[in-house]
Image (cartoon, rainbow, N blue to C red):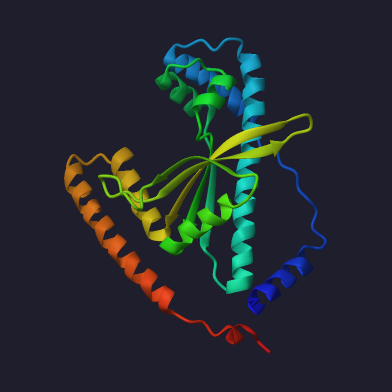
């Protein structure tokens, strides 16, 4: 069964997009990458061997990881669009993509005690490319994970289910790291992408917890931590109830058709 409302949307998109011109934008800010390498050397009194070569290598590295991130996000968007057309339901509320800065990569490698090279980054830093998938319901999280992992070119590297087993502070989310091939002009590279899947409620809770942990100047942090944990428990119970309600609903697909 197809959702007519979505078909009309697609028709409108095709109509208004037929004369669009692809606007090419520089995805990597080379001067910014150079500045990040320089700041890291100054702040940590660390010498990066041959900064010019390091700049070129990291520019290539970031391009590959950005490509992997785009491929995975596109896969998720295609699955979400298909579900909308077939079931009039979007499992995904929205996606957020981010690339780790070179400075953050260097800092993580320093903590791990590995040299600041692209080879070391590829072997030891698995979250250079990251996607946050914000879903509408808890079941949507596991649905999108299952559909994504069915695809032949997606391999699971690591999985941590903080929904089934929340962190001590109340944090809930599903974390997976997948590997995907990125096809370049002269090679095929297997690149990891970190994916965090959570509901809208889990996401705004995590945003507030992040503010408490990293941006809070109030001395009474423990009071707010306790309150946040209680909020997490309340939200979890509310989401389970809303999931049951959603599962119990039946939809008359004919109401989707305007004719």
Q: 207 and 242: which one is in front?
A: 242
| Residue at image point 61% right, 47% down | 72
Left or right: residue 8 versus residue 109 is right
| Residue at image point 28% right, 56% down | 232
In this rendering, the answer to whether 201 lies above or below 170 is below
Where residue 76 appears, as percent x and y from the top left, is 59, 54
Where residue 73 appears, as percent x and y from the top left, is 60, 50
Left or right: residue 113 versus residue 55 is left
For the N terminus, give its image quadrant: bottom right
Q: 231 and 194: which one is in front?
A: 194
Q: How many marks overall?
A: 0
Residue closest to the far right: 19
Residue 259, by quadrant, is bottom right
Where residue 250 appears, as percent x and y from the top left, is 48, 82
Q: 184 and 207: which one is in front?
A: 184
| Residue at image point 70% right, 76% down | 8
Where residue 95 appears, as percent x and y from the top left, is 54, 53
Left or right: residue 227 versus residue 16 is left
In this rendering, the answer to whether 235 lies above or below 192 is below
């Amino acid at each position: 069964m197809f959702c007519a409302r979505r078909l009309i949307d697609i028709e409108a998109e095709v109509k208004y997009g037929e004369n669009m011109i692809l606007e090419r934008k520089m995805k990597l800010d080379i001067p910014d990458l150079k500045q990040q390498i320089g700041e890291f050397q100054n702040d940590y009194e660390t010498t990066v061997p041959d900064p010019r070569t390091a700049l070129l290598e990291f520019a290539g590295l970031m391009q590959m990881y950005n490509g992997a991130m785009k491929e995975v996000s596109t896969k998720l968007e295609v699955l979400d669009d298909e579900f909308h057309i077939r079931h009039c339901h979007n499992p995904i509320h929205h996606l957020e993509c981010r690339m780790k800065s070179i400075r953050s990569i260097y800092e993580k490698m320093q903590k791990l005690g590995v040299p600041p090279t692209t080879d070391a980054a590829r072997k030891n830093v698995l979250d250079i490319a990251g996607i946050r998938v914000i879903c509408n319901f808890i079941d949507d999280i596991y649905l999108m994970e299952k559909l994504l992992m069915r695809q032949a070119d997606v391999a699971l590297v690591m999985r941590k289910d903080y929904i089934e087993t929340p962190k001590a502070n109340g944090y809930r989310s599903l974390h997976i790291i997948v590997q995907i091939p990125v096809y370049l002009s002269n090679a095929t590279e297997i690149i990891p992408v970190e994916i965090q899947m959570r509901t809208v409620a889990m996401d705004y809770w995590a945003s507030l917890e992040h503010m408490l942990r990293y941006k809070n100047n109030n001395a009474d942090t423990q009071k707010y931590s306790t309150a946040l944990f209680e909020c997490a428990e309340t939200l979890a119970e509310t989401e389970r109830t809303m999931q049951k309600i959603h599962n119990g609903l039946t939809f008359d697909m004919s109401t989707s058709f305007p004719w």
